[in-house]
Image (spheres, rainbow, N blue to C red):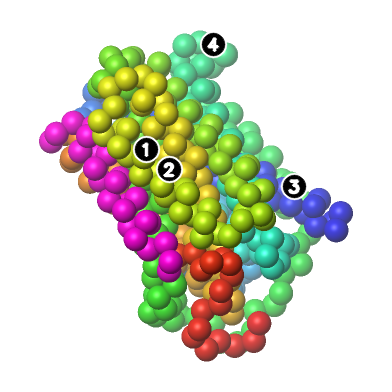
Amino acid sequence: MNNKYLTLIPLMLCFFAMGFVDLVGIASNYVKADLGLSDTVANVLPSLVFFWFLIFSVPTGMLMNRIGRKRTVLLSLAVTVVSLMVPLFNAGFTAMLLSFSLLGIGNALMQTSLNPLISTVVRGGNLASTLTFGQFVKAIASFLAPYIAVWGATAAIPSFGLDWRVLFAIYLIVGLLATLLLVATPIEEEPQTGRASSMGDCLRLLGRPVVLLSFIGIMCHVGIDVGTNTTAPKILMERLGMSLNDAAFATSLYFIFRTVGCLTGSLLLRLMPNRTFFIVSVAMMALSMAGLAFGTDRLVLYTAIALVGYGNSNVFSLVYSNALLSVSDKQNEVSGLMIMGLFGGTVFPLLMGFAADAVGQMGAVAVMAIGVVYLGMATRGLTPDNGLTPDPSPRRGE
């Protein structure tokens, strides 16, 4: 038991490194301000990060079958470290496109492989709560990012001439530490048996209703997550006349409540049915969309940001763990498909950028609201009442 918990320490630090991807929200706002970009062009940066999930997620599931889950996580950390180095030397638009692309590729590799690696260490009914705790650790990195960027921009901490980009330097050090600790941690993985899956085999799993519903559900979850991350500061700037440094608090507020949601969710999911918890979460997100769309008061807008942060915090863990446990003999492949759903982080910001340039930030909120509506309508398929109902399709041994 003690060995299991010791093994989880470097894995949780990897979850912290996974949270680096959420710096794209505040970083894209600073790049927009530095380079004078429109919403449509600026939103290309976070969209580009999540575009690579479409390309790399399923192949990463296949790669895990060849080299193992731990080695795949180590590869993801190496790519992430390189991505964090680029802005330290060049902050031009092309350099930021390269950095964000590498960050997206590294995160696609990491999210596809780290979650199944957790299932190697933690089995059975505790998987959802453990993944939720991992999301809590990830959220710490997410909500720290805006603070570190603002502290660097305002010289509240030594930035060594990097200004807000000191964020990349600090996270680079953490990424290197995560890599070294994981290298030093032995993890025994079960040998892969049977024929290796092809790309077609992986994609055919979308023919199973629970897998398809979960795939779309994760697209919506990530679209709302990235959308709020990038749009909440713009809403405060548009309606309350805040500066970017002050409005960056919106991103931190979102991630603070997402962090609290992950922490409390890991406890509540042991005490109540998954579906009940999911319904409450979606209801909170629906109230949030109304507040973000029509609110003009500081308290209303802050409350709306907090509600979507808390409500959206556990959606990924619930949907992902249900899909993974429903097709237990194809977990690597299902993981790849689920992480491919993070492509929603490309689709939503692009649509939100067009909508915001056309009608203001209310248009961006309307795009996110579509995702909330889907999650509400698909609740029954996304979360069987006990959270662990197996897929009825035939499968090989457990």
* Mark 4 lies on residue: 156
| Residue 147 is at least partly visible in this image | yes
Amino acid type at image mark 1: Ser
Q: Residue at x 36, y 25 (%)?
A: 300
- Of circles 1 and 3, the one toward us is 1
Q: In the rendered image, which quarter is residue 378 located in? A: bottom left
How many numbered discs sit on the rendered protein? 4
Q: Residue at x 49, y 64 (%)?
A: 383
Indicate the secondary structure of the residue bearing disc 3.
Answer: helix
How far, Cα to Cα, is label 4 from label 2? 35 Å
* Mark 1 lies on residue: 288
Residue 345 lies left or right of residue 137; in this view the side is left
* Mark 2 lies on residue: 284
How far, Cα to Cα, is label 4 from label 1? 32 Å
How far, Cα to Cα, is label 1 from label 3? 34 Å
Q: Looking at the image, which is closer to me, 347 or 320?
A: 320
